[in-house]
Image: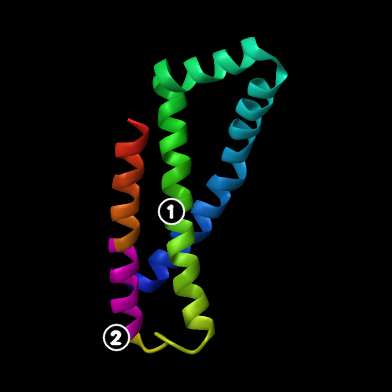
Amino acid sequence: MPLPAITSILHRISGIALFFGAVFMMYALGLSLESEVGFQETINMFEEGFFARLIAWLLLSALAYHSVMGVKHLCMDAGHFEELESGVLASKIALGIAGVLIILAGIWVW
């Protein structure tokens, strides 16, 4: 399977992950807005909880990947990177940018 096809499939998977991950983030938002105690619980959840940090990092990673690949798809819709060679190059560049953003998100969360 060519690299552009793999990145396209992963783009769809990251969109699904963002959809379901929004449930966790809405829970955290709701908890933080309930009261001052709920706000402190939310802060503690993200500062001390391994799984909360992991979920936050995975969601940020999915958001970074989905955004970068979305821009690549918009460029393709405009008529760029449609040939096989330029499509593979665009996929490699987009993967590199997404990788850097995912690493930066990991540094920020952890």
Look at discs 1 and 2 and give the one toward the viewer.
Answer: 1
Q: Is the magenta stretch mostly helix, strand or loop?
A: helix
* Residue annotated with mark 1: 64
Q: Which residue lies furthest to the right in this view?
A: 34
Name which residue type carries label 1.
Answer: Ala
The structure residue drawn at horizontal position 34% and vertical position 76%, both measured from the top left corner, is: 90
Q: What stretch is highlighted in magenta?
A: 86-96
The structure residue drawn at horizontal position 34% and vertical position 48%, both measured from the top left corner, is: 102
Q: Residue furthest top?
A: 37
Name which residue type carries label 2.
Answer: Glu
Element marked by disc 2: helix
Tell me the tag on residue 85.
Answer: 2
Residue 42 spot, x, y in % from top left:
55, 19
The Cα atoms of the two marked residues, 1 and 2, are separated by 24 Å
The structure residue drawn at horizontal position 50% and vertical position 67%, both measured from the top left corner, is: 70
* Quarter of the picture holding the N terminus: bottom left
Residue 4 spot, x, y in % from top left:
38, 73
The structure residue drawn at horizontal position 52% and vertical position 76%, both measured from the top left corner, is: 74
